[in-house]
Amino acid sequence: VPAPRRKSRGSGRVRPGASATDGPALSREAILEVALQLVDRDGLDALTMRALADRLDVYPNALYWHVGSRSNLIGALSTVVFDEIELPTSPDVHWRDWLTTMIEQCRAAMHRHPHLAQVLSSQLVPTTRAMPFVERTLAALSGAGFTDDQLPLVYNSVIAFAFGWPAVELSSMPAGADATWHEEFAASLDTLSSTAFPTLTRTLPALRNAAFMLRWESGLTAPLDAGHAMALKILLDGLEAQVATA
Amino acid sequence: VPAPRRKSRGSGRVRPGASATDGPALSREAILEVALQLVDRDGLDALTMRALADRLDVYPNALYWHVGSRSNLIGALSTVVFDEIELPTSPDVHWRDWLTTMIEQCRAAMHRHPHLAQVLSSQLVPTTRAMPFVERTLAALSGAGFTDDQLPLVYNSVIAFAFGWPAVELSSMPAGADATWHEEFAASLDTLSSTAFPTLTRTLPALRNAAFMLRWESGLTAPLDAGHAMALKILLDGLEAQVATA
DNA sequence: ACCTGAACACCGTTCAAGT
DNA sequence: ACCTGAACACCGTTCAAGT
């Protein structure tokens, strides 16, 4: 009896076709795909080398040959998400429109993978794969009229906004956020003294569960579309003011 | 021989005075203080219940009575950092100046605790302790001339900037960033085709290790002061444009 | 090259028991 | 109330060995 190529799973069944075509049982792409599913469904903490190996019908240490380490794997995942960002192709769009779709693409990618949003923003991986993205953003800003001196600073302002804003929007609620917690917090908002917090209590209805530090839902379930649109407008108008004074 | 009140450490010595005054051996404040030291020195991964307990001369499970869980502890740490943010007291400063110092205070606090920056930005804890911060920010914006309808959206734009920008700035470099890696990457920048990447190669000197996705140092060792100042100017000018059209 | 099998040195957390 | 002592069910990673 030949030894089985793959580890038998809990069900005792080996995936069909495994012994028929015998390429390498694992590939980096397959690992990343399943890992991304796992993170999207159950969060980053659920991405365990052992859980991942289980889904792939392999021993945990088999993964190390392909991805090196867990933190390496997470870095690879964030570049996968980054590669989902598609930039407008037509070169003659107005720079405001170009930046708008670029920024909205970034936000959309992060919303598709909310548990990777903080990783993406807090670990902007420098790879040669990202260079087209960089070039086109710089070109758009250059076309807007910014001088080469301004370019690096303005570029950073735009990138930090594109990735930072959705990361804050998608920020997760505190760890022990049970069902009763948000009711308590929501109720505590109504007991705020209107003399100590005049502006807050006056505009509270519009702030409830919509303003940072006053909400109990993540941007995943309660997206802040209007807030992002306003912030984008502020950014673009602010940029325009800089290009005028240059 | 009475049983010792505290666990003996590796050195075999018990902290002096432990058996003299016998209050509770542990306090929530003491735990947070040591935990913050640990994170600041060695990063978030180094914050282990066991390592923390070791430093406090206690058994690991003793911590659970005071802080509940590790994720709970991390949440508590981020509110400690948040409380370090001091707002300008004088009420008659111009709103641009008020927002400027508020935003700079946020950035300064995150720079003091770079390993908690991503936690702070991606987990803006809603607590009653934060309400004064919220009120005063809203009041500043209201004083700037924004209507109550605009207030929530503008507030979110400001907050996301205040916490999101430094988080991106302080983003850590990829996991397996050995000493040779950044040399390779730096060298690869010089081999970029000037026809495929005209804008990038033209402004490369100013972008090297200074622009997002083109740097190999974190904002911790290579702060982006000028970039943040520019971004702040863009924000304020953009805000001014909105208040004009209101 | 690519994976198995087994092991190492850790983790967070819980439970009963002490005081 | 507050902590000990011991244990449980996990982790990531490494090493030798197979093919």
Image (cartoon, coloured by chain):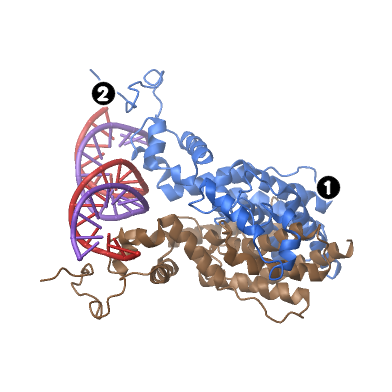
Chain colours: A brown, B blue, C red, D purple
- The image quarter containing residue A96 is bottom right
State which quarter of the image contains the N terminus of chain A. Answer: bottom left
Q: Residue B93 carries which label?
A: 1
Query: Observer-nearest residue: D7 or A123?
Result: A123
- Answer few, some or many: residues within 10 Å of disc 1's Cα (few below 14, many 20 plus, some between 14 and 19): few
**On the picture, is A139 further left or further right than D3?**
right
Position of residue B40 relative to residue B151, above or below, is: above
Asked which secondary structure carries label 2, the reply is loop
Q: What label sits on residue B3 in the rendered view?
A: 2
Q: Is residue A123 above or below residue B77?
A: below
Are the residues flagged by discs 2 and 1 from a single subunit?
yes
User: In percent of the image, x 71 and y 63: which residue is there?
Assistant: A158
**Element type at mark 1:** loop
**Outermost left residue:** A1
Subunit bearing disc 2 = B
| Residue B233 sits above or below residue A99 on the image | above
Q: Is residue A9 visible?
A: yes
Is residue A118 rendered to the left or right of residue B151? left
At label 1, the amino acid type is Val
Tell me the amino acid under the disc marked 2. Answer: Ala
Quadrant of the image occupied by residue D18: bottom left
Image quadrant where one finds the C terminus of chain A:
bottom right
